[in-house]
Amino acid sequence: MIILRQTAKVFAIIFLFFAISDAQSSIYRLEAGTKIRVKMDVEVNSEVGAKNDTFIVKTDQPVRNGETILVPVGTLIEGRIVDSSAAQSGGRGGKLILRFEKILLEGGESRTIEALRELKAESSQKASVLSIIGGTAIGALIGAVTKSGSGALIGAGIGAGAGTGVALARKGKNVRIKTGEIFEIVLAKEVVLPVRDY
């Protein structure tokens, strides 16, 4: 009988421990899919940004669970450029892929996080194709006005060459996040934060 009572007490204590632990962690847990609004500290852009360059953002709004503030305004989040390519001739736009990796909490604690943001400039290759077609048509028209038998063909060739030159010279646009720009990141995995009173 004594053994049965002691066993019951042990199980009760274990159950209580896990119940309290689960209740605390559920309040201080950022679920996957949580949106965090942040402000960029220093500009990043596809023209000069390189793979593995690091940057900092700060939370612009508190992250809450009900009335409990889990992440206060001004909390730092470290990020890194994982891929970058500058705009190129031929109308190809720039690209940046940013990874947000660590949230720095008060008291020197930190938590690893996982969030990605991809920025990609629209390609202007449609405009490049129109330049070639337009150059060909204008060249053919000018050649036809000369009234020589092969003038239209020669004019079309010259126009196509000029249009191709314009298309190749046209550079795409770079992408950037400016200093002070506000945007959202979305957590890919849940994060359990330390229990704090803010």
Image (cartoon, rainbow, N blue to C red):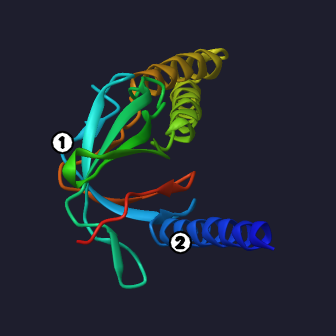
In this rendered view, identify the residue nearer to me: 168 or 48: 48
- Which residue is under mark 2? 20
In this rendered view, identify the residue nearer to me: 191 or 135: 191
In this rendered view, identify the residue nearer to me: 145 or 57: 57
Query: Which part of the image, by quadrant, shows the N terminus?
Result: bottom right
Describe the element under mark 2 as helix, strand or loop. helix
Q: Residue 4 occupies which quadrant of the picture?
A: bottom right
How far across and down, in percent of the image, does residue 5 sit? Answer: 73, 74
Query: Which part of the image, by quadrant, shows the C terminus?
Result: bottom left
Describe the element under mark 1 as helix, strand or loop. loop
**Numbered label attached to residue 24:** none
> Label 2 amino acid?
Ile
> Label 1 amino acid?
Val
Question: Which residue is located at x 55 percent, y 29 percent?
Answer: 132
Picture layout, residue 168 above or below residue 93? above
How far across and down, in percent of the image, does residue 40 sit? Answer: 24, 50
- Which residue is under mark 1? 42
Q: How far apart in space, not on screen, are marks 2 and 1 (Cα)?
A: 42 Å
How far across and down, in percent of the image, does residue 108 sit? Answer: 22, 45
How far across and down, in percent of the image, does residue 56 sit? Answer: 25, 42
